[in-house]
Amino acid sequence: MEGAAAGLMSPSGSPGDPSGTPGQAPGDTASLEKAGAVAMNAVKGSTILSVQSQNGGQVWEVQLAGSDGTERLLEVGASGKVVSGPRAKDTGEAEKSRVAGIVKDAKVTFEDAVEKVSASAPQSKITHMSLDRYDNDLLVWDADVATLDGGWQGIKVDARTGAVTKIG
């Protein structure tokens, strides 16, 4: 994705098969939201940067950051238990500063962004969400949504205003 900030998790390739996320029926975000809540509980006082379905939906990889920009990674199983981490990500001072700015500037929470994406694509499954800053200073929650017909679409939520933009 051109213009996206480097260093935050982004998907490679297709976001996946909508039938591959256990516990998440079309229009249901419980598994994604559960993974986010478990991760936030494991790393208190942090902000979610990215949640992505892995291994056919058996695991959610979650990237979080503290207000100082320190990033941590962990994995949450479909059962809702932490299966790996949290482990600190060594990014260097410049990246920590950049991430701290993203955390500070984001006014729309992960939970609010999930709700907005779900309302925009009610018969789909969110397979990936990340908080990204683009070169033009646009700060967005970027979601990959798997559709019932096996396709996918990208949906962006402005992380400052909550405005939703569908991208195909």
Image (cartoon, rainbow, N blue to C red):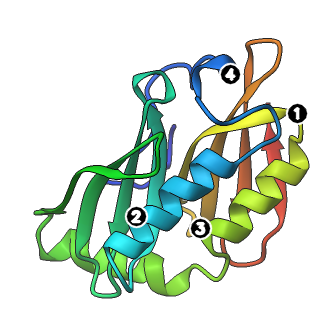
Q: How many angstroms separate mark 1 from mark 2 (CA)? A: 26 Å
Residue 85: x and y, percent? 20, 56
- Residue most toward the top? 149
Element at label 1 = loop
**How would you rate the neighbour count of disc 1 (Cα within 10 Å): few for under 14, some for 14-19, many for 20 or more?**
some
Tag 4: amino acid: Pro
Instruction: Look at mark 4 in the image and give the residue it sits on.
Output: 18
Residue at image mark 1: 123
Q: Considering the image in quadrants, where does the C terminus appear?
A: top right
Q: Earlier in the sequence, mark 2 or mark 3?
A: 2
State the separation of the CA atoms marked 3 and 4.
27 Å
Q: Earlier in the sequence, mark 3 or mark 4?
A: 4
Q: Residue at x 35, y 82 (%)?
A: 44
Q: Which mark is residue 39?
A: 2
Marks 4 and 2, the one that precedes in the sequence? 4
Q: Amino acid at mark 1?
A: Gln
Circle 3 is placed at which residue position? 139
